[in-house]
Image (spheres, grey):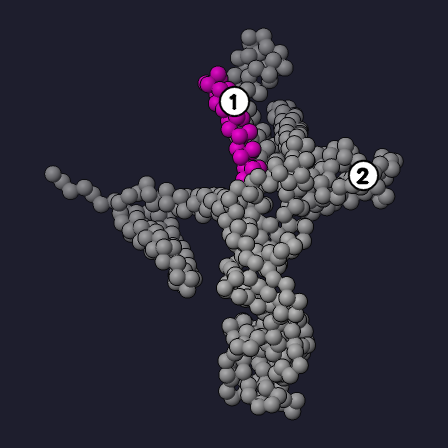
Amino acid sequence: MLPRPRRELSTGFVVSRILVLAVGSAVAFYAAPPLIAAESWTGLTVLAAATALIAYIYLSRRHLPLKYLVPGTVFLIAFQIFPVLFTLSTAFTNFGEGHRGTKEEAITSIQTSSVAQVPGSPEYNLSVAVRDGELVFLLVDTATKQVQAGTAAGLEPVSGAELGLTGKVLSAPGFQVLTIPQAAARGAEISALTVPTAEGAIKANGLSRAFEGRAAKAYAPDCDCVTDSATGQKWTADPDEGAFVAADGSRLAQGWQVNVGFSNFTRVFTDPRISAHFLSLFAWDLLFAAASVLGTFGIGLIAALALHGVKVRGTRLYRVLLVLPHAMPAFAMFLVWRDMFNTDFGLINRVLGLHTDWFGEPVSARFAVILVNLWLGFPYMFLVTTGALQAIPSELGEAARIDGATPWHNFRRVTLPLLLIAVTPLLISSFAFNFNNFNAIRLTTNGAPFSVDNTTVGGTDLLITYTFRLAFEGGSAEFGFAAAISVFIFILVGIISALAFRRTRYQEEVYA
């Protein structure tokens, strides 16, 4: 039996294999140090196993299908599966403003944020510096002239520092001392930096002085509570809410992240701010998405049919002109259209001689945002339907005409069904996109108009914009709640898309 001849690999295949190995190795070397620092041994094991598997697949001449499947699978996990799982896991937590870290971090934040200067506390001459990108306080004890570097981790001695006539550090080995203008530009960071000490913490008092103060709030492990030494008020830890709560119901701003179960989901039905408007918002969301998809498809189809005729001249020019709205940056066009609908100086009122307050009434505002979305969306449908029409065999139309079909019946019974089989998946994806079209509302009306007695929900708000306002514009960022609403929207869009795909499958079977 003759030996099987050895296959020669193409240059492109070899180059692509080298690129995949290089990218995989780079990702592994980049991700390994943070995992080691965080002592995430499970993550490190998964990373090592995945890297070894990729190396084995691409260094071997076998497993050719896997060489093409692995990149797609990696991207699917990284950009589809992982974001969905992360969003779902976040929806069951209270993750948000004031609830980002652990309980220990919350206690440290509570104590250091309550630091205040007391009589007789040590004072320091302050120079602000940078070391390895980190902001550092260079502190000179006014009594002993000892120089120390202060960071969020604590104090450390500094040797070889050069002091000026005012007692401040002018230079120090390993530190870049900031000038006054440079330090002033980072004033917020300087004010937020707190250096913990055995007696309290050191905070800046301006840009040239610092003091060691005492924490007014202290944590006691025996009662699992925080007490204010000045007022005597006590806040006890609530493990279910991840916060320190007082007897009167008040709570400290610093909390920690905990699992809250289905409370973010049940809030949709129990919180009157949400449940009272959910159905109306959902109905308008459906109307907006459906009107946008059907309108853009209808306009795009009419334009494609008009330019599909063999006798039409200058089709290239017409097609370029029709695609122009799609080529413009969408965010800029939303802002331009918003100004065009302005009541006083908008182009639409000036040209038509009107004085309509387009964004002042819900009906006119909804009509305006749908009109803007149609103008931005129909070029895409025009391109899609143009390609689909060119893929339909002309013999089918000719056969229908021979059988006596009118142009309308030819379009209705032959062209349109075959066209829908090709473009229905794109229509479904367009519906899902417009159902969550945040920019269309945010950049034109921002949800307006609002009623006098309710400034939370607007006449043009979609579910996504209303959720954003509740979660991020109420003075705190509620990522867990926003994730729960995202899961609801995902389920609704998934159900609608599944029903539409099922209808499409029936249609394909009929015209197969």
Percent across and percent down for residue 330 are 66, 44
Q: Residues within 10 Å of mark 1 (few under 14, many from 20)?
A: few
Vertically, is 180 above or below 16?
Answer: below
Residue at x 48% of width, y 16% of height: 510
The residue that label 2 is drawn on is: 360
Magenta range:
487-512
Q: Position of residue 502 (x, y in %)?
A: 49, 24
Q: Position of residue 256 (x, y in %)?
A: 54, 57
**Label 1 to label 2: alpha-carbon separation:** 39 Å
Which residue is located at x 66 percent, y 81 percent? 119
The residue sitting at 20% across, 43% down in the picture is 5
Q: Amino acid at mark 1?
A: Arg
Front-most of residues 434 and 410: 434
Considering only vertical position in the picture, is 168 above or below 422?
below
Extreme residue in the top direction: 404
Hey, which quadrant is residue 321 in on the image? top right
Mark 2 is on which residue type?
Gly
Residue at the spot x=73%, y=34% of the render? 366
Residue 158 on the magenta segment? no
Q: Is residue 1 visible?
A: yes
Judged by depth in the image, the label closer to the viewer, 1 or 2, is 2
Magenta-colored segment: predominant secondary structure: helix
Query: Circle 1 — which element?
Result: helix
In the rendered structure, which disc, 1 or 2, sits on the residue that comes first in sequence? Answer: 2
Left or right: 317 in relation to 175: right
Count of numbered marks: 2
- Nearest the viewer among 227 and 96 is 227
The reply to whether residue 314 is in sight is: no
- Position of residue 378 measured from the top left corner of the image (x, y, whole percent): 65, 33
- Helix, strand or loop under label 2: loop
Number of the label disc, if any, that sits on residue 503: 1
Quadrant for residue 152, please give it: bottom right
